[in-house]
Amino acid sequence: MTDAYHGFFGEEVAARYDEEGGMFDPAVVTPTVDLLADLAGQGRALELAIGTGRIALPLAERGVPVAGIDDSEAMVERLRAKPGGDRIEVAIGDFSTTRIAGEFAVVYLVFNTIFNLVTQDAQVACFENAAAHLGAGGAFVIETGVPDLQRLPPGQTIIPFRAEPAGISFDVYDVVTQRASSQHFEFEDGLVRSYPVDFRYAWPAELDLMARIAGLRLRDRWSGWRREPFTALSGSHVSIYEKPAAS
């Protein structure tokens, strides 16, 4: 994982991460946990980039044994300080390569985080790492956005997505390399603070090929956690990749 990713999720971002509003709304969290609990069944779940436990803690409350991997000690400190957080096994390291002992029924990576791996090799390694943790018939679940390039006219590279008194944000795309960056500027007490984060976008079809390289196959794809149909107009997708049973 890159230093840019690690730096972005350092102490300053970790301190305010749980105040980011919508993604902590029960209307968002509950259907996510419902689907993951259903996939886990009686088995264990592994969250890649577990962060402060937004999904892991309510999933554990459902009785699913949960473990996690994250390279941000600042984020994991917040997880461990929450009720039940000290009972979740967490390995500190790059989620594309770090291993946790044992076998899992479901491995999941949510909220666009696959794109925080900024090379194709790292993204493939993430699929391979997920597959290595899964038992036969297990599922690797990815939630991420569909690249918003239909909004880019020829020659334009910037898509703004937030403009409010507290700050502005925009994405900058390089359509040749599939590299991009989210630029966040916060306005506070007459000061401007910048929080850039790099990412590499990938189309669903490219992710499907990464899964095949890792020995997984696409089982289902929806536009959201409530199993809404995925269409040409969907802005995001939840994809379920399955590890085939041994022949």
Image: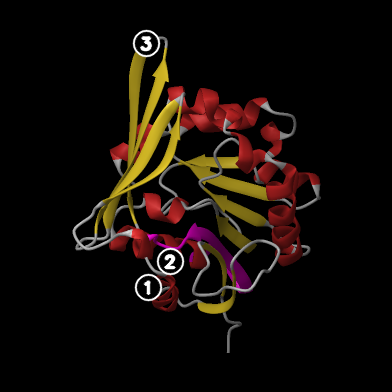
Give the x, y percent position of residue 234: 53, 67
Tag of residue 206: 1
Q: Amino acid at mark 3?
A: Gly
Seen in the image, is 87 located left or right of residue 196?
right
Is residue 104 at all visible to an observer of this figure? no
Give the x, y percent position of residue 150: 36, 65
Q: How many numbered circles does the render carry?
A: 3
Seen in the image, is 92 located left or right of residue 81?
left
In space, the residues marked 1 and 3 are separated at their CA atoms by 44 Å
Q: Amino acid at mark 2?
A: Glu
Q: Amino acid at mark 1?
A: Glu
Give the x, y percent position of residue 71: 44, 39
Residue marked by disc 2: 128
Q: Nearer the viewer, mark 2 or mark 3?
A: 3
Above-or-below relation of 224 to 8:
below
Above-or-below relation of 218 to 11:
below
Q: Nearer the viewer, mark 1 or mark 3?
A: 3
- Range of the magenta residues? 132-148
In space, the residues marked 1 and 2 are separated at their CA atoms by 15 Å
Q: Secondary structure at mark 2?
A: helix
